[in-house]
């Protein structure tokens, strides 16, 4: 079974992380599939890409057991990928991009 599924329906493309049993932790195969999903230009009718995930967690981060020790496989095609549109999402989120208030 594919770890990343891509489906298109008119103006919407859905990319689904399908490794819920591992909390969608990214291994080398998933990163290669995600890179492939976003490498080419979008279809003429495509207006938005929705990234979804199966299971209770969107993504637990990098799967350290399923990846090689070297870092160069991760950086690979980052600068060559086309720039897609980014839209804000409703709801709260946590991660390196969110600023947190410091307790005093």
Image (cartoon, rainbow, N blue to C red):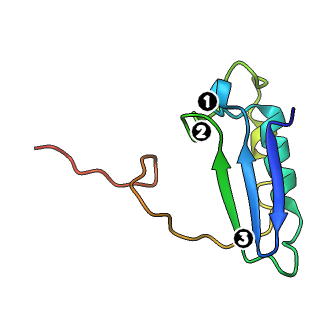
Q: Which mark is residue 90?
A: none
Q: Is residue 28 above or below residue 99?
A: above
**Which residue is denoted by mark 3 in the rendering?**
84
Q: Which residue is mark 1?
A: 23
- The residue singled out by tag 2 in the image is 59
Q: Position of residue 56 (x, y in %)?
A: 54, 34
Between residues 98 and 22, which one lies in front from this camera angle?
Answer: 22
3D distance between C-alphas at marks 1 and 2: 6 Å
Q: CA distance from mark 2 to mark 3?
A: 20 Å
Q: Considering depth in this image, is 15 or 64 the residue closer to the camera?
A: 15
Q: Quadrant of residue 87?
A: bottom right
Q: State the CA–CA distance, disc 3 to disc 1.
A: 25 Å
Precedes in sequence: disc 2 or disc 3: 2
Residue 89's place in the image compared with 2, above or below, is: below
Question: Residue at image x 23%, y 51%?
Answer: 101
Q: Which of disc 1 and disc 3 is earlier in sequence?
A: 1
Tell me what residue is drawn at x 79 percent, y 43 percent.
4
Q: Does residue 43 appear in the picture of this structure?
A: yes
Q: Quadrant of the N terminus?
A: top right
């Amino acid at each position: 079974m594919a770890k990343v599924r891509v489906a298109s329906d008119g103006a919407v493309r859905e990319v689904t992380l399908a490794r819920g049993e591992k909390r969608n932790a990214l291994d080398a195969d998933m990163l290669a599939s995600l890179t492939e999903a976003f490498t080419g230009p979008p279809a003429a009718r495509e207006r938005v890409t929705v990234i979804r995930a199966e299971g209770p967690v969107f993504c637990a981060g990098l799967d350290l057991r399923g990846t090689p020790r070297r870092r160069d496989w991760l950086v690979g095609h980052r600068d060559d990928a086309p720039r897609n549109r980014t839209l804000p999402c409703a709801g709260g989120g946590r991660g390196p991009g969110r600023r947190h208030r410091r307790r005093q």
